[in-house]
Image (cartoon, rainbow, N blue to C red):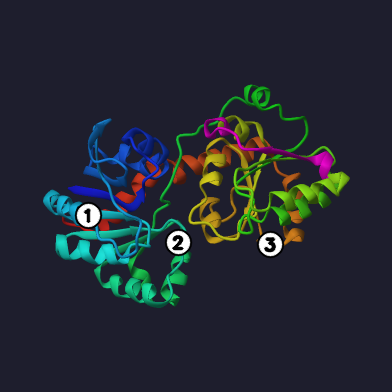
Amino acid sequence: MKLIDLNYHASNEYTTPQQVISDHWPSLGYIGVLKNRFDITVIKHINYEGEVVQDDIVYRFFRSLNRFWHIPFRTHRYIRMQKPQVIIIQGFVFPLQLIFLRLSVGHHCAICLQHHGERPFKGLKGMIQQFADRFVTAYSFASKEMANDWISAGIISSIDKCFEVMGVSTSFGKEGKLLAVSKTGMKDGTCFLWVGRLNENKDPVTVLKAFEKYLALNPNAVLYMIYQDNDLEMEVKNLIKKNSTLENGVRLVGKIPHADLISWFSAADFFVSGSHREGSGYALIEAMACGCIPVVTNIPSFVKITDGGNCGLLYEAGNPDSLLNALVKSQQLDLPSEVNKVLNQFKLNLSFEAYAGQVQSMVESLLPNK
């Protein structure tokens, strides 16, 4: 069976195939599992033209434009020549391109859209998304509950077209605790780790408000914050500077190389997030791959990732008191047992093998006779 993984977004900052393959591996790693079951070609748009075969996987690159109205006809001609049975499009924001793709490949090919946190368009673009639904065979979300906004907006016609596919995973794995602590310099005590942008959606202010109260109950706790986006950096720094409790209990690490996160996740006891919405939750998945116990918001993707809160603790987004209760409950957990539970959840439901299984299950249900 011929399967094409297609990304319309033009990542023009990339000029070599190896760069984009490496950086996009979280969404591509499932292919390494399925390459012996399907004939798979990955198509990406970067500042490079040509074909590369790496680890027995074919990657085809085209130059393109990031414009809503731009149709990459050369890409579509190439896809038509491949005669695929299934096309997985990464992202929900290319309805016009999807319509032209369907006209190019015909109706004997399943076209599936993988959600990556996008929201429905409004106005004319929303109408085009709604029209494009008739050309889509299936949609995949980290959690089916996330389809509700698209159904309510009248863009997705039926929940029956929706599948649960996580959409990303990681090659991270747990590092030895002593080694990880020596690399990161984490202090003794209960260590919490924040990894994410400092913006309103990630909501670091709610996390800090709750952690201040928690430090009164557990003064040996420390919150380490790794971040690169600085929308709320000054607000966060001022909040900490004006509060001696937070000054003693919070460490602003800032930006670090991505590969170093393995040591930070492995050294920390808990991963904490304040997100109000996520397409999946890449940092959370990375944390769990390293055995870091989640204390995260009860948004649909996090509920799915944590097995309904069976792994770690969930709290209401934007509610410091709810987070405080979760932090207090974290003291009652049997940490070795909880770490094993987290690692098992990752292996069974969040790994590349699990991601590949979800894709295969969706494809087989769409093309039962193939």
- In the image, taking residue 248 as reference, residue 124 lies left or right, namely left
Disc 2, SS? loop
Residue under numbered circle 1: 86
* Residue 252 within the segment the image draws in magenta: yes
- In the image, taking residue 149 as reference, residue 271 lies left or right, namely right
Residues drawn in magenta: 246-261
Labels 3 & 2 near each other (Cβ < 8 A): no
Labels 2 & 1 near each other (Cβ < 8 A): no
Q: Which tag, 1 or 3, sits closer to the chain's start? A: 1
The type of residue carrying mark 1 is Val
- Res 243 label: none
Disc 3, SS? loop
Disc 1, SS? strand
Residue under numbered circle 3: 318
Residue under numbered circle 2: 118
* Residue 76 within the segment the image draws in magenta: no
Up the image or down, 181 lies above or below 146; here it is above
